[in-house]
Image (cartoon, rainbow, N blue to C red):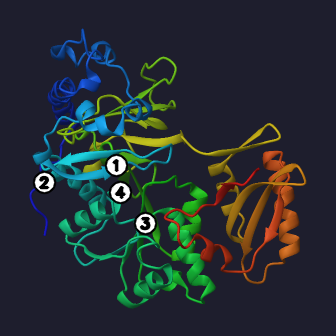
Amino acid sequence: MSQPPPLPFPKSREEIAATQSKRKVVAFQRARQAPFHRGRLEGIDPAKLDDPAEWAKIPIMDKEQLRAIAPERFNAEFCIAPREDIAELWRSGGSSGVPLFYPRSFEDLPHCLHSFERAVEMVGMGPGDTAHISFPLGIHPVGHAFARAAQARGVGVNWAGAGNATPSALQIELIDRLRPTVWMGMSSYGIHLANLAEARGIDLAASSVRLILCTAEPLSDAKRDKISRMWGAEVRDSFGMTEAGLMGAESEARDGFHIWTDMFLIEVVDEATGRAVPEGEPGLLVVTPLWTNHATPFLRWNSGDVVTYREHGAAGGRFSVFPVIRHAGRTVGFFKISGINLNHPEMEDFIFRQPAVIDFKAELVTEAGRDFLRLSIETMRGADPEALATELAGEFRETFQVTPEVVVLERGTLAAEFESSLKAPRFVDRRE
C-alpha cells in the first residue's frame, strides 16, 4: 500500500515558490559537476538564481547536444552519480531521433515514482480499481513506472504490456475475463484494441473499463472522442518525459495538464529570443527537474513541446495549486508532397472525425514516376465503400489541397498489420 511520499503535497503557490528557490540552487550545483556543463555556467551567480535575468543566462540545452557525446563517453561527460548509486536506466522516447539512456539513482526513484502516483490520484484511481496496463514493459519506463505507482495507490494491476509482449487478441480476452476498471496505454494502441475487438464481434464499450489513462503521444479532441466512444469510458491524458518524470495530468475539466511545479520548474519561452512569453501565448517548454537530478543534471532542458501556460485551471481541489499547460503544437512528423506540408496530427484528426471510418493508414508512394498520397481505410459495417471513398477524397482535398487515393480495406486488415508495433505506424513514407 501507499508509502509516505518523498515530499509533502504543496498547500500554496508560495510554498511551491519557496521549494523552487531552494532546489534551483541544488540543480545548478549538481550541473556544475558534469563536464558537459563546463564553460556553460561560468559567470552565473548561484545566489541570484531567483532573479529571472540571472537564471536566463543559463543556456538552454537540447537532445542534439547530448547525442553529440560519444555513447561510450556519455556517463563520464554528462552523468554525475557513481555506478554503485544507479538503480536502473530509463530509455528516452526516441521519437525525434536515436534514443538515449538515462541512469536513475536510488535517490531519484522515489521522486520519479511519486510523480506517477500523483497522476494516478488525479485521474481518480484508487483502492477497488484494477488497471490493465498496455504500455510497453521494458527499457522504456512508462509501463513499469505506472504499474508500480498504481500499486502504491492501492490499485490492482494486470501487467500486460504492449502487443509485442501480450498479443492483442489475448489482451481483449483478459479484459473480458478479468474485468479491470481502468485501461492504461498509448492512445493509438487503444484504438487498435477497439478495432480488433469490434472485428471479432466484441463490444469494448460494454466492458468493465470506466476510465482510460494515456500518455506518450498527442491526444487530440477527435482522437479522445473516438477512444471514449469505442470503449464507453472517460479518457484522461498525462504528460511527462524520460529526462524528468511524469510531470502532470488532466483534471476532470480536461483543459490541459496540471504540472507538478514543486518537482519540475517550467518556463514557456519564445523560441527565437529565449524570453518568457505572456500567459496564454504559445512558447517553447523548458524544464528543470528539481528532485530527479542526482544522476542526470538536466538544467533548462528544451522539451521540444510548444505550449501555452495558465496560472489557474478550471477545476478545483488540491491539484488546483498547480498551473496548467496545453499543447499548442509539438515536434511532429509531416509529409511534403507537391510543395504542401501535410501535418500528421492534423490528418489524423481529420480522418478520426469521419464517423464511418474506424481506422486508417497514410502512405506516400511512388508509382509510374509520380508521388502521391494513398489513404487506406476501414469502414463501419453498413457503409457504402465507394461513396465513402469519393466523399473522403473530396473533403481531404478541400482541407489540405492534396487529392489522395482512397483504398477501402477489409475489416481487420490494419489491426493485423499494426499488431507487432508498439505504436500503430499510420504514417509511412514509401517513396522511391
Residue under label 2: 5
Residue under label 3: 185
Residue under label 1: 248
Callout 4–callout 3 Cβ contact below 8 Å? no
**In this picture, residue 368 sits left or right of residue 44:** right
- Mark nearer the N terminus (3 vs 2): 2
Callout 4–callout 2 Cβ contact below 8 Å? no
* Quarter location, residue 290: top left
How many other residues sit within 10 Å of disc 2, few (<14), some (14-19) or many (≥20)?
some
Could you give the CA–CA distance between mark 2 and mark 1, rounded to whole angstroms? 16 Å
How many other residues sit within 10 Å of disc 4, few (<14), some (14-19) or many (≥20)?
some
Answer above or below: position of 333 versus 165. above
* Quarter location, residue 297: top left
Could you give the CA–CA distance between mark 3 and mark 2, rounded to whole angstroms? 25 Å
Residue 22 position, x and y percent, is 14, 28
| Helix, strand or loop under label 2 | loop
How many other residues sit within 10 Å of disc 3, few (<14), some (14-19) or many (≥20)?
many
- Mark nearer the N terminus (2 vs 1): 2
Could you give the CA–CA distance between mark 4 and mark 2, rounded to whole angstroms? 24 Å
- What's the amino acid at mark 4? His
Between 278 and 244, the one nearer to me in the picture: 244
Residue under label 4: 140
**In this picture, residue 269 sits left or right of residue 384:** left
Residue mark closest to the camera, 4 vs 1: 4
Between 292 and 431, the one nearer to me in the picture: 431
